Image (tube, rainbow, N blue to C red):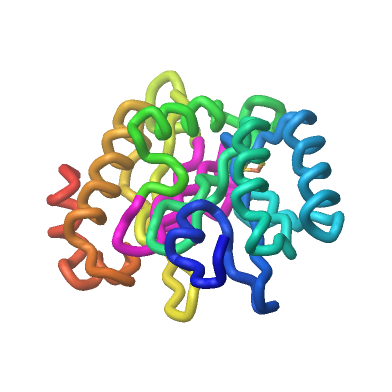
Amino acid sequence: MNSNYDLEALKKRGFLKARQEGFFTLRTSVAAGNYQARHLLALENIANKYARGFVHLTVRQGIEIPFIKAEDIDKVEQEVKAAGIKTGASGPRLRATTSCPGNNWCKRGLVDTFYLFRRIEELGISCGLDLPHKFKIVISGCPNHCTRAETSEIGISGEVDFKSPDKKIGYVVYLGGCGGTAPRVGFKLGKIFNLEEVLLIVKSVVTLFKVKAKPRQRLALLIEEIGRDKFLQEIGL
Ligand code: SF4
């Protein structure tokens, strides 16, 4: 790799420029944050071979390897792919969807968060999807909201519908949260949804954001611009 790095293209490939000249950080992602032992062995090997022998755990359940030399990026990318690990996203695109264990093993979990994660990915809504600005989805298995449902563009959590005769388990959805320099708390939609309804909401919101948001406009600001009622109408609610 020559020294005229295309930083945007490298970001899309999961390599972020470090503040130290000539070094990059590899960002990885795997489904719902579930790294297999073989993934960890491959990343250990890469960290030892091409970097400084340690990794960093991100808040979005990714593993980063800092201090990779620019000239090693292509080789590292090949080894990461061969190990079945995806690279993570940065820049104007969908970030890794974070998911707590839900009812897979957490004793409080009400819903299968990993299944919901897979169903969202099957819609083509997966880490790295190009969008006008960064966009985050989080999934929590119960109202404890361990993945902070209110602070991302789309936050989903399992909840008991106490109003239904058989106390069905469904999902609540929060929209329009974000961090950054202009943080916003997402607002909660006014009913408990079933899985298929949640998938429709996710698809509609991401599609609308892709079409209507301006570059560098977070979902919260798009909603403020067009008005919450109109926004909800446009996503079919
Ligand atoms: S949100 Fe609920 S299900 Fe998920 S880890 Fe927290 S307590 Fe467990």
Above or below, 13 relative to 194: below
Look at 70% across and 63% down and name the residue there: 69
Tell me where residue 45 sits by quadrant.
Answer: top right
Q: Is residue 157 shown in magenta?
A: yes
Is 193 displayed left or right of 37 in the figure? left
Quadrant for the N terminus, please.
Answer: bottom right
Look at 41% across and 42% down and name the residue there: 172
Query: Which of 21/98 is in front?
Result: 21
Q: Is residue 138 shown in magenta?
A: yes
Above or below, 27 relative to 79: below
Ligand 1 rendered quadrant:
top right
Which x, y percent locates residue 224?
24, 71
Extreme residue in the front direction: 2
Query: Which of 135/91 is in front?
Result: 91
Residue 142 makes an appearance in the image: no
Above or below, 111 relative to 173: above
Tell me where residue 215 sits by quadrant.
Answer: bottom left
Is 189 displayed left or right of 21 in the figure? left
Look at 21% across and 52% down and name the residue there: 208
Which x, y percent locates residue 140?
55, 42
Which x, y percent locates residue 80?
65, 40
Above or below, 68 relative to 83: below
- How many marks overall? 0
Chain part drawn in magenta: 130-158
Which x, y percent locates residue 76?
66, 47
Query: Which of 26/204 is in front?
Result: 26
Extreme residue in the top direction: 166
Is 123 displayed left or right of 142 in the figure? left
Quadrant for the C terminus, please.
Answer: top left
Look at 40% across and 34% down and name the residue there: 120
Residue 160 makes an appearance in the image: yes
